């Protein structure tokens, strides 16, 4: 009997100890919760930006990380051309287009889009650093692009032909804005036989051509040591001269989107972000004037246009008729020319000629590479 009582007492003490220990463990666990691993930010929305290289280099590329840091979303940048961006937005393959020109009133497809001004940028003539000519007047620029001035000697430089470069894409932002200011027509034809896909490729060409001349923007070329930024009417392109309107050739950069886009909430949030101090600081780093800081520059735009008109005259039919027949630009940039003509007239004879020229150029390139490879092989 005593043995039974001792065993019962022992069992009771063990059970009580286990209950107390379990309670203590439970209380300790509640007091010290297990730390959760921080989860990485996963953006709810991806915004696809497509457009010209001017807008991309000017501010968009720099804003990708900033936009993500503020946990606003993820921005994917697809750079090609103004028209590709606008067409992508219309087709729904892009949310936002970056363009360096205003809406083209003659294109019905652009009237249904929203053009939101973002910043001001200068259009700058570029040449090779070794070229002694550093300044051009508006009248000289007008005559050069009409083909009436075609030698650097006429501008105070060497006796050498002016190798004039332009962007091949139709209605490109920089070219359209420049021609609109100079000729009142953004689609004005000019005597520029050397065509490139974008201003980046154009700058690369001028960097190896002492007789080269072309147009880019301040935001795209200010840090490019391979080219020389020329003054216009003795005025240097800079953020102060853009802001006060004293530099005559500047344009507005826009973001464009559909008002009924499926992703409209995210698009509007990005547009608001572009007006933030973070975005403005990024623009200023690239020599842009944020549109919100431009003041009444557009209210005073009449003064700038009057200044340009005083230096040049409008293009007349006689001007266009007098434009020299330069060699066909097909030979300068075969692929760019074919893409340009495919958009404008895909079934035209000139488009077929451009297609044949591209095939011929690629065959010649392959033959040259094969010849170089054969010459580089060690002799037995």
Image: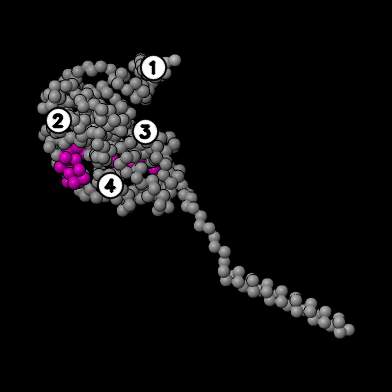
Gap between marks 4 and 3 measured at Cα: 23 Å
Gap between marks 2 and 1 measured at Cα: 40 Å
Of the residues under marks 2 and 1, which one precedes in the sequence?
A: 2
Circle 4: element type: helix
Whether residues under marks 3 and 1 lie with C-beta atoms below 8 angstroms apart, the answer is: no
Q: Residue placed at 19% from the left, 18% from the top?
A: 324
Q: Residue placed at 54% from the left, 60% from the top?
A: 36
Residue carrying label 3 = 80
Gap between marks 2 and 3 measured at Cα: 33 Å
Residue farthest bottom in this picture = 2
Gap between marks 2 and 4 measured at Cα: 29 Å
Crowding at dot 2, Cα within 10 Å, few <14 / some 14-19 / many 20+, comes out as some
Residue 56: x, y in percent?
34, 39
Circle 1: element type: helix
Q: Which mark is residue 375?
A: 1
Query: 22 or 78: nearer the eye?
Result: 22
Circle 3: element type: loop
Residue 252: x, y in percent?
26, 41
């Amino acid at each position: 009997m005593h043995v039974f009582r001792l065993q019962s007492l022992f069992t009771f003490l063990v059970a009580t100890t286990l209950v107390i220990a379990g309670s203590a463990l439970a209380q300790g666990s509640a007091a010290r919760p297990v730390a959760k691993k921080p989860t990485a930010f996963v953006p709810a929305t991806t915004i696809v930006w497509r457009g010209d290289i001017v807008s991309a280099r000017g501010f968009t590329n720099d804003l990708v990380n900033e936009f993500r840091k503020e946990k606003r979303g993820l921005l994917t940048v697809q750079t090609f051309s103004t028209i590709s961006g606008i067409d992508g937005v219309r087709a729904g393959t892009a949310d936002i287009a970056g363009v360096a020109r205003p809406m083209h009133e003659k294109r019905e497809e652009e009237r249904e889009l929203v053009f939101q001004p973002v910043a001001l940028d200068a259009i700058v003539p570029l040449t090779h650093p070794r070229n002694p000519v550093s300044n051009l007047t508006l009248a000289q620029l007008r005559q050069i692009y009409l083909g009436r001035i075609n030698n650097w000697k006429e501008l105070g430089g060497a006796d050498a032909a002016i190798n004039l470069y332009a962007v091949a894409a139709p209605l490109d932002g920089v070219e359209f804005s420049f021609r609109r200011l100079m000729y009142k027509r953004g689609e004005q034809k000019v005597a520029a036989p050397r065509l490139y896909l974008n201003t980046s490729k154009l700058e690369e060409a001028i960097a190896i051509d002492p007789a080269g001349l072309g147009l880019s923007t301040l935001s795209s070329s200010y840090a490019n040591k391979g080219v020389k930024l020329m003054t216009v009417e003795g005025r240097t392109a800079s953020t102060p001269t853009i802001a006060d309107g004293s530099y005559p050739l500047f344009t507005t950069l826009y973001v464009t989107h559909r008002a009924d886009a499926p992703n409209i909430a995210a698009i509007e949030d990005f547009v608001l972000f572009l007006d933030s101090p973070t975005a403005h600081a990024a623009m200023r780093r690239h020599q842009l004037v944020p549109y919100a800081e431009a003041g009444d520059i557009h209210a005073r735009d009449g003064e700038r246009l009057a200044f340009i008109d005083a230096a040049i005259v409008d293009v007349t039919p006689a001007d266009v008729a007098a434009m020299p027949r330069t060699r066909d630009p097909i030979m300068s940039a075969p692929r760019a020319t074919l893409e340009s003509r495919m958009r404008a007239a895909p079934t035209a004879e000139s488009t077929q000629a451009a297609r044949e020229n591209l095939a011929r150029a690629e065959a010649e390139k392959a033959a040259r590479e094969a010849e170089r490879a054969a010459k580089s092989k060690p002799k037995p």
